[in-house]
Amino acid sequence: MTTLILNADPATGSVRLTITPTAEVTRVRRSDVNGTAEVRTMTDQLPHPAPDVLVLDDYEANGHARYTVTTTAGTVTGVIILPLASPWLGTPENPQHSAAVASVLDYGAGGVSRATVHEPDGDDAPIVIGLGGSTRRGSIRVSTVGGTYAEALNVFRILGRGQTMLLRQAEHPGMDMYFIAGNYDIVTALPDRARSVFDVTASYIEVARPAGALSGALGWTWAALEAAFPTWGDVEEAYATWGDLRTDRRKA
């Protein structure tokens, strides 16, 4: 029987799934406070053959999460709680560009009507083409964990990547969202010369969950790989696949 082991890692805001399949794995889904979605995988990770162990890292879960692994022989489920001690802000496709922030401040959300009104000559009644309202848009202000300029600059640079961002937090159900940042700024929260505290503000437009493959992991860098292995041949000797390399799962 296929087995599923779940491990929460609050330090990286992720859940690791270790799947030992007895049949081909075709689909992995997560259900949590934000609904049901496919667990984001790297390119070509699914379908996955048995009996090779499949390791996935989910960087988009929040709180109580239920995972369903679908194989050609049936399904296996598991439940875990990912405690987010603070909000997370980052790029879901590249979780290495993510940061835990202390809190979300000055949050505002509005909408824009997308209806079109035409007022033709000689007709007292306008012609209305009705469309649903826009997604949320507004502004947020986040305070970093230490309040340092370096931390604020890191968040500033993440926002500047131009990718779809993900906000996750545990305090306010419904606030989580995928969004594109507009204007973003580093601002002084508490001015006190060398002891000044800095926040980051950004305008945003809510967008759909991006469909791209996972292409990184929090804490994984090329620099660390280069420092650990003198040649690419040594890397190939240590890891069987690219997925094993990304999750640091070395050959026995």
Image: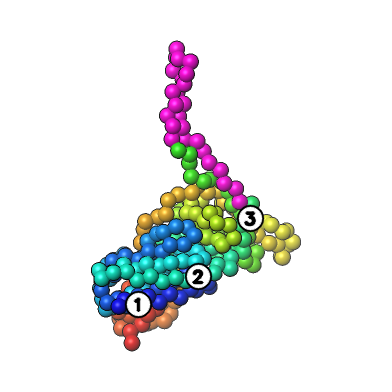
- Residue 34, image x, y percentages: 47, 57
Q: Secondary structure at mark 2?
A: strand
Looking at the image, the residue that sits furthest to the top is: 122
Inspect the image, locate mark 2, and give the three-letter code of the amino acid beneath it.
Ile
Q: Nearer the viewer, residue 54 or 171?
A: 171
Quadrant containing the N terminus in the rendered view? bottom left
Q: Nearer the viewer, residue 62 or 199?
A: 62
Q: Secondary structure at mark 1?
A: strand
Query: What are the residue bounds of the magenta stretch?
Result: 107-131
Q: Which residue is mark 1?
A: 3
Circles 3, 2 touching at the beta carbon (< 8 Å): no
Q: Nearer the viewer, residue 132 or 218?
A: 132
What is the spatial separation of the Cα atoms under label 3 and label 2, in whole angstroms?
A: 25 Å
Circles 1, 2 touching at the beta carbon (< 8 Å): no
Does the rendering let one see residue 159?
A: no
Q: Residue at x 74, y 61 (%)?
A: 192
Q: Residue at x 30, y 83 (%)?
A: 237
Q: Residue at x 69, y 57 (%)?
A: 189
Inspect the image, locate mark 3, and give the three-letter code of the amino acid beneath it.
Leu
Residue 128 lies in the magenta-colored region: yes
Inspect the image, locate mark 1, and give the three-letter code of the amino acid beneath it.
Thr
Asked which quadrant contains residue 36, the reply is bottom left
Q: Which residue is mark 3?
A: 105
Q: Secondary structure at mark 3?
A: strand
Q: Earlier in the sequence, mark 1 or mark 2?
A: 1
- From the image, give the main secondary structure of the stretch colored magenta: loop
Q: Residue at x 53, y 45 (%)?
A: 137
Quadrant containing the C terminus in the rendered view? bottom left
